[in-house]
Image (cartoon, rainbow, N blue to C red):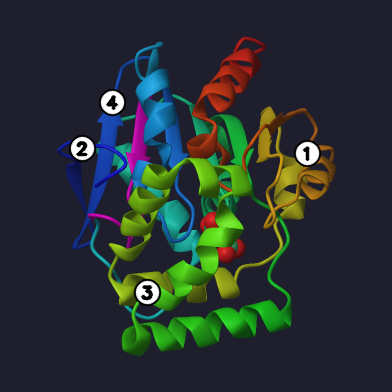
């Protein structure tokens, strides 16, 4: 079972790699950047609501995930950000966008904001952080990446599931859990390894956030164990203009665990633009 029946995605050729993109609705452009190791489907409950309310929702499968091609070795956060820019160019999206990234998607969105500040109308940071990995965390990630070709994605996924969903979701939403696992297991291990190595080498981006001139919206699951609410709130306060919302009954994947509240907070923030 999938989180949604997969719609046919557009395929965009970026220097020889085919990247898959979901493009639904019309209106103000919102680009959704997924976390690790997910794909565009983690946004689908939010996209199905916003795409009928005047938004064009663009959600790529990042290089190495979902239906996109993978690149072996290391895919840096900068490279992912350049892929987003190339996707926008290919879709002929020239107006400033609302860029919305969760966790790894947040790292990529911050990097995009640094490289292409004029392309941003608003930055939405979900369940993410500006801090780089500690040396130990980076080393662990590299070890995990090196183990993936041999061990496959199973051990990584089993270890992550209890950290990304809150207890209520784990207990009460078995179908969501099964679909999420299937999604996490569906990628090529070499693509996931390359992204893990890219995250391990990323730099702290708190200076990028502090320098941004566009509004920043920060949304966080109230039980997020990976990017805890207190840390995210403190991060929000470092931006020049920010709004912060806690999403109830949610862990690290708030847009998936509580899409109703997530969407209504998004719409409320949008009303302030
Ligand atoms: C994610 O959800 O993208 C991951 O938790 C990011 C990370 O491992 O730092």
- The crowd level at tag 4 (other Cα within 10 Å; few <14, some 14-19, many 20+) is some
**Percent position of residue 40, x then y:** 35, 44
Does residue 129 sit above or below 218 in this rendering?
below
Q: Distance between the residues labelled 1 and 2?
A: 35 Å
Work out how far the residue at label 4 is from the one at label 1, CA to CA, in angstroms. 29 Å
Residue annotated with mark 4: 24
- Of 226 and 74, nearer the camera is 226
Q: Quadrant of ligand 1?
A: bottom right
Q: Earlier in the sequence, mark 2 or mark 3?
A: 2
Looking at the image, which residue is at 20% across and 47% down? 12
Residue with the mark numbered 1: 236
Between marks 3 and 4, how big is the CA–CA gap?
A: 30 Å
**Nearer-N-terminus badge (3/4):** 4
Q: Position of residue 74 (x, y in %)?
A: 43, 76
Please check the rendered image and state whether residue 260 is part of the magenta-colored stretch, yes or no.
no
Q: Residue drawn 45% across and 48% down?
A: 34
Q: Which mark is residue 153?
A: 3
Q: Does the residue labelled 2 lie within 8 Å of ligand 1?
A: no
- First in residue order: circle 2 vs circle 4: 2
């Amino acid at each position: 079972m999938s989180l949604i029946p997969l719609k046919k995605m557009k395929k965009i050729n970026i220097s020889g790699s085919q990247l898959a993109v979901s493009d639904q609705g019309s209106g103000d452009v919102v680009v959704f950047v997924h976390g690790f190791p997910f794909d565009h489907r983690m946004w689908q409950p939010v996209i199905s609501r916003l795409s009928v309310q005047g938004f064009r929702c663009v959600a790529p499968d990042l290089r190495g995930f979902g239906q996109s091609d993978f690149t072996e070795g290391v895919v840096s956060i900068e490279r992912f950000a350049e892929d987003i820019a190339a996707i926008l160019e290919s879709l002929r999206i020239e107006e400033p966008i609302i860029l919305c990234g969760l966790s790894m998607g947040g790292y990529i969105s911050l990097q995009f904001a640094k490289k292409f500040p004029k392309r941003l109308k608003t930055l939405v940071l979900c369940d993410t952080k500006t801090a780089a990995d500690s040396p130990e965390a980076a080393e662990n990630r590299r070890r995990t990446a090196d183990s993936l070709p041999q061990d496959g994605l199973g051990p990584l996924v089993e270890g992550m599931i209890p950290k990304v969903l809150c207890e209520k979701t784990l207990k009460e939403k078995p179908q969501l859990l099964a679909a999420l696992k299937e999604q996490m297991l569906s990628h090529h291990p070499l693509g996931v390894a390359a992204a893990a190595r890219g995250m391990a080498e990323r730099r702290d981006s708190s200076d990028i956030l502090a320098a941004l001139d566009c509004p920043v919206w920060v949304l966080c699951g109230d039980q997020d164990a990976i990017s805890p609410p207190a840390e995210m709130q403190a991060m929000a306060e470092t931006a020049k203009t920010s709004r912060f919302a806690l999403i109830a009954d949610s862990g690290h994947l708030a847009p998936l665990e509580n899409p109703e509240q997530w969407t209504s907070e998004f719409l409320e923030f949008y009303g302030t633009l």
